[in-house]
Amino acid sequence: MTTTASPIRTERHDDILVIVSDNPPVNALGAAVRQGLEAAVKQGVADASITAMVIRCDGRTFFAGADITEFGKPMQAPLLPMLVDMIEASDKPIVAAIHGTALGGGCEVALACHYRVAAPSAKLGTPEVKLGLLPGAGGTQRLPRVAGIPLALEMTAKGDPVSARTALDAGLIDRIVGEDSLAEDALAFAREIRAKRPIPRASQRALAPDPDAVAAFTKANARRFRGFEAPAANIACVVKASETGYPEGVAFERSEFMRLMTGNQSAAQRHLFFAERQAARIDDVPAETALRPVDHVGIIGAGTMGGGIAMNFLSAGLPVTIVETSAEALDRGVAVIRRNYEATAAKGRMTPEQVERAMALLTPTLEFDALGTPDLVIEAVYENMEVKQDIFTRLDAIAKPGAILASNTSYLDIDAIAACTARPQDVVGMHFFSPANVMKLLEVVRGAKTAGDVLATVMALAKKIRKVAVVAGVTYGFIGNRMLIPRQTEANALLLEGASPEQIDRVHVEFGMPMGPFQMADLAGVDIGWHRDPARIESVRDQLAVEGRWGQKKQAGFYDYDEKRTPRSSPRVAEILDEWRLKTQTPQRQISDEEIVERTLYTMVNEGALILEEGKAQRASDIDVVWIYGYGWPVYRGGPMFWAKAEGYDKIVAGLDKHGFPVANSLRQGSIK
Ligand code: 3HC
């Protein structure tokens, strides 16, 4: 065995050369790995006593891709496209031995190898599209030639990895080997094929066009791809593979890759990749902080939020005790949980056994005292400070020492809630987003006294239940909802000044949001937060609420709806607006789309800057994560703070100044971090 400082080492097994990468954490294909691979393959080719080679990785995974941290910097030779061509050109067969996740450039290395064997749990994928890119090392040309156009479209344009089983069925791998015997089995496989000729080379395979598959795929995913540049580029490259020879296809792939790489969308998506990982770090809590064990979760309230929150833990295999005050509410809550799971199973995303396993972990009860055993208790009752304070007082009396006591409040002061207990260090906010079993965001609200290990535990738990967690300080609405406030205030004001709900919503949808502010109000319920006093009509929204226009659920809100919930402009809403314009003596004028952007989106950025100045968010990229995962901000715009920087802070400041908004200092000075 030869060992050097290089992350690549070689092992000789008689006439087989095994090339091993050891580049933690994910064997990214950085310069040292590429150089080591090149040298090792050259060594194998030059050595007459070698008949075949195996490439495998130590650690948790096969190469998980190009090294993203190198993007945008000058690249050192050999570049990945050259390396993979050199691997494929070897006149001795090379076997890729795959475990973990062979992603992106890693999948391309595997495709350049002549054979691929994989552990049963291995996954293969080309997730570049999620970074606004495409597989740029021949992947778009080799993958369809090996696995067929339909699977290549799925893998490249959607970016989701496939299992070893799917890969085997499509011919993307040649054999599934033992889970714990990959190294030996790959070696045995290499011995089997070492004398076989011709050596199969992906780039030399023929590929017939399949326009029907391409059209069907494009149509089926039109909604998912809306606004994104990279999916279409991936599709175009796969199509090219079926229309031209390999060299032309690769040239096309290269030019498309460079176009995407230098564009704004990929920059935004790569920003998000790191932002999401950065969000897990708490500035003053060391990464090695010992965590509190959480093996049992208690939830107070089996309503929409409580039930959705419970599902996260049940799905992750954690027992949940859920408490309600009436048998009726409890039964209803449990039935909704079951119904949601069964709907998931009906879509094939869960097996009936998994549904039963999750439900078996749930203990519904009317006994508050049952919350004496869980390690974490999450309160999810309605937004009322007195009610929450009462619950926390009672919880303090019975919860076991060291249990984490969390509130799912979306606006209220965690410190005031914690103050009702003798253990404010154990109290934290866990703000889930509705529907809580679906939305990826979790705002973790840090009270003045919340202990470091409580925060660290909750952040780790968030990862376990597959949430993206962001730490927020105590401030009204925390990060996300606080930024909604100026947006909503301005949207309402714009209505009176002459804009229509349709215009404002359209501007937001064209920007890339899933829906505009008034569509969102109709979906959530116009009556939410309404004072319910019919004599007090102080806004357009009050007027709608009084008239029973509560949104989609009543088929009337800011829009009229038919039974299928298709929205139509509402003549009644137009009337109400005219009445209110008169009543408030607001002169009507033509509102430009630009003004809507400036007043509803620039003000959000300004609020974000204030949140940062007040230390209520740790970093600008955390705010981006909140808005992408909690509110559907378009991924390709990287979040509000990234977008503001890309647009230019000066432009944002000028837009705010134009309408007389007080501008945050850090925004004006361009010193946002
Ligand atoms: N380059 C550089 N660093 C990477 C990386 C990559 N491709 N992939 C992961 N990392 C880093 C992460 O930033 C993280 O670093 P940190 O600990 O300092 O925060 C660390 O590796 C571990 O990553 P995760 O926390 O994400 O670990 P998981 O076990 O949850 O997930 C994974 C592992 C599935 C490999 C996941 O990291 C992942 O999806 N990575 C991205 C894979 C990818 O997009 N590859 C394509 C790259 S583009 C490409 O190959 C272009 C080519 O076609 C030319």
Image (spheres, grey):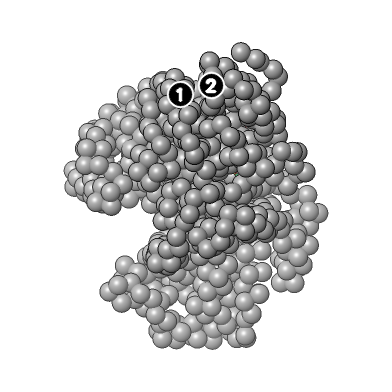
- Residue 286, x across and y down, in percent: 62, 25
What residue is at 45 percent from the left and 63 percent from the top?
A: 209
Nearest to the observer: residue 505 or residue 357: 357
Residue 482 in the figure: left or right of residue 178: right
- The answer to whether residue 556 of the structure is visible from this angle is no
Q: Residues within 10 Å of mark 2 (few under 14, many from 20)?
A: many
**Residue 483 falls in which quadrant of the image?**
bottom right
Label tally: 2
**Which residue has dot 2 on it?**
16
Residue 494 in the figure: left or right of residue 573: right
Q: What element carries label 2?
A: strand
For residue 107, the mark is: none
Nearest to the observer: residue 131 or residue 374: 131
- Residue 359, x across and y down, in percent: 23, 37
**Which residue has dot 1 on it?**
191
The CA span between labels 2 and 1 is: 8 Å
Residue 298 in the figure: left or right of residue 385: left
Q: Residues within 10 Å of mark 1 (few under 14, many from 20)?
A: some
Three-letter amino acid code at disc 1? Arg
Q: Indicate whether 360 appears above or below 484.
A: above
- Residue 24, x across and y down, in percent: 60, 26
- The answer to whether residue 296 of the structure is visible from this angle is yes
User: Which quadrant of the figure contains the N terminus?
Assistant: top right
Instruction: For the residues labelled 2 and 1, say whether their Cβ atoms are less than 8 Å apart.
Output: yes
Asked whether mark 2 lies closer than 8 Å to ligand 1, one says no
Residue 483 in the figure: left or right of residue 184: right
Q: In which quarter of the image is ligand 1?
A: top right
What residue is at 78 percent from the left and 62 percent from the top?
A: 650
